[in-house]
């Protein structure tokens, strides 16, 4: 299978070009985890997101209205994390994917989360998932 995130060939074949926005190491405090020591207090999470966008014929014209503003993503993730307790990183990552794919211009989203402070012998533990927009025609991904 083609890994579109590391080889955007499928996107290039489909659209002729790729556009990607990303958030790197967005640090949030989350009420997350299944272990008793994780349930005592919120813990740091690092969130990473890659959004591949459908190319548009609208010129950018150096105008934020003509592109996808990162603010919706940063604010949306912060609100989602604060909205409830999560047992699993997997559940949170899939909720963030749902958020990402609410925007019509997003054809593929990759989201990962990392807990940097869970185990003293690990830099981090985490989860990652990639999803395409249903009907995007992109192959080699887990389109939903």
Image (cartoon, helix red, strand yellow):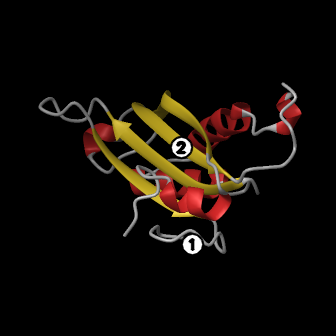
Q: Callout 1: 10 Å neighbours few (<14), some, many (20+)?
A: few
| Contact, mark 1 vs mark 2 (Cβ under 8 Å) | no
Task: Identify the residue at image location x=67%, y=59%.
Answer: 15
Residue named by callout 2: 50
Decide if residue 32 is on the left or right side of residue 85. left
- Can you see residue 87? no
* Residue 60, percent from left and from top: 83, 33
Q: Residue at x 47, y 38 (%)?
A: 48
Q: Residue at x 58, y 56 (%)?
A: 12
Quadrant of the image containing the C terminus: bottom right
Where's the N terminus, which quadrant?
A: bottom left
Task: Count how many numbered circles sit on residues in the image.
Answer: 2
- Name the N-terminal-most of marks 1 and 2: 2
Q: Nearer the viewer, residue 138 or 142?
A: 138
Rounded to the nearest angstrom, the CA distance separating label 1 from label 2 is: 17 Å
Is 80 situated above or below 22? below
Of residue 14 and residue 26, the one placed in the foreground of this image is: 14
* The quarter of the displayed image where residue 72 is located: top right
In the displayed orientation, state which residue is furthest to the left.
121
Up-down: is 33 above or below 22? below
Task: Please indicate whether residue 106 sits to the left or right of residue 84 in the image.
Answer: right
Residue 98 visible, this orientation: yes
Indicate the position of residue 9 as horizontal and vertical percent values.
Answer: 49, 57
Q: Residue at x 53, y 43 (%)?
A: 50
Q: Quadrant of residue 125?
A: top left
Element assignment for label 2: strand
Classify 109 as above or below 24: below
Is 142 situated left or right of 109 in this image? Answer: left
Task: Judge by depth and name the residue closer to the eye, 55 or 84.
Answer: 55
Q: Secondary structure at mark 1?
A: loop
Which residue has dot 1 on it?
144
User: Where is residue 30 shown, x and y percent of the image?
Assistant: 47, 36
């Amino acid at each position: 299978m083609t890994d579109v995130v590391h080889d955007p060939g499928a996107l290039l074949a489909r659209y002729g070009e790729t556009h990607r926005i990303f958030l790197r190491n967005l640090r949030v405090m989350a009420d997350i985890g299944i272990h008793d020591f994780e349930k005592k207090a919120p813990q740091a999470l690092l969130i990473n997101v890659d959004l591949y966008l459908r190319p548009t014929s609208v010129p950018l014209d150096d105008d934020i209205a003509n592109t996808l503003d990162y603010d919706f993503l940063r604010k949306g993730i912060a609100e989602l994390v604060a909205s409830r307790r999560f047992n699993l990183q997997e559940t949170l990552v899939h909720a963030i994917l749902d958020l990402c794919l609410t925007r019509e211009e997003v054809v593929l989203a990759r989201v990962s989360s990392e807990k940097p402070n869970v185990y003293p012998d690990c830099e981090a533990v985490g989860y990652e998932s990639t999803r395409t927009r249903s009907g995007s025609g992109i192959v080699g991904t887990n389109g939903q």
